[in-house]
Image (cartoon, grey):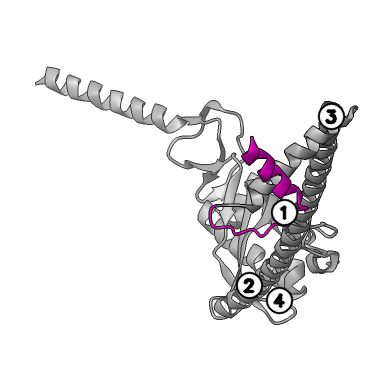
Amino acid sequence: MKKVIGIILVVALVLVVLLFVTGTIYTVREDKQVILTQFGKPSGDPITDAGLHFKLPFIVKVNELEKRVLSWDGESAQMPTRDKTYIQVDTFARWEISEPLLYFKTLRDERSALSRLDDILGSETRNAVAKHDLLEVVRSTKDRKPARTDLQTENETDFEPIKIGRRTIEKNVYEIAKTKLEDIGINLLDLRFKRINYNDSVAPQIYEQMISERQQIAERFRSEGAGEAARTAGKMEREVKRIESEAYLKIQLILGEADAESTRIYAEAYGGTPEREAFYEFVKTLEAYDKILDEKTTVILSTNSELFKLLKGSKSE
């Protein structure tokens, strides 16, 4: 019996020691920082060094906080611009815990921090959008020059000028919100308007207007293209006629030169003596008669005609 009681006491002692050790030792990860609380109140400075640490058991509680950069993705909210156009603005921000003790005292956990970010960033974004026209909120570059096609004029493609632009508005919201968040231990690193859309009630009309404007531009481009095609076709037709005219002129010149060369050859062949000239005249006369006479031709000849003499001489022979 005494032996059993001894074993029970040893086991109980071991359990007490284990509970004491586990309640005394805790680990801090690289991406975490710790606030120790005693009876719900912060005790001591924040612990930011990673590794094993010790605390009083049972009465001291370990509260972990993020050391990493965190993101805030606000819900898309409807906001009016200064020119009374309702738009949907989706905002995104990055933040970190810069003062762990202040953060813990005012917010306690990340869920409360996100809620406070919703309030501050959402309200400042709404105020900034309400102070500027739609173009200022949407456009980001003040002096951007658009690309142009050959058919577009300079006035048709120039953007309407802006004074501030979206980047400056984002910067203003960031600076105001950063100051407010520093009071609760949060360091705001960046803020951007992730997406800006027209309100669902006015988007169809705006899209229809945009489509109509693009269709008008496309129709004008088609008209100008048809005119350019007609001018090109006319130019091509004139070029074809010019080429044909030049070709015909060259053909006539070649034919003239050929006739002259033929005449020269005939002159050299049949000229020079009376007999050659008479023979040439005789040959050309035969060629002429061959062209004008056939089987159905009736010819009335005088006794003085050359053909009569030729036929009479041929018959007598």
- Mark nearest the camera among 2 and 3 is 3
Q: Amino acid at mark 4?
A: Thr
Image disc number at residue 275: 3
- Give coordinates of residue 15: x percent, y percent: 29, 27
- Which residue is at a point 85% across and 58% down the rendered structure image? 143
The residue under the point 55% across, 34% down is 31
* First reached walking from the N terminus: tag 1 or tag 2: 1
Mark positioned earlier in the residue sequence (2 or 4) = 4
Q: Find disc 1 in the rendering and name its residue.
A: 182
Please name the residue that numbered disc 4 is placed on: 81
Range shown magenta: 295-317
Q: Image quarter for residue 145?
A: bottom right
Q: Hey, which residue is sitting farthest right in the picture?
A: 272
- Check if residue 302 falls in the magenta segment: yes
The residue where tag 2 is placed is 215
Q: Could you tell me the amino acid type at mark 3?
A: Glu
**Residue type at numbered disc 1:** Glu
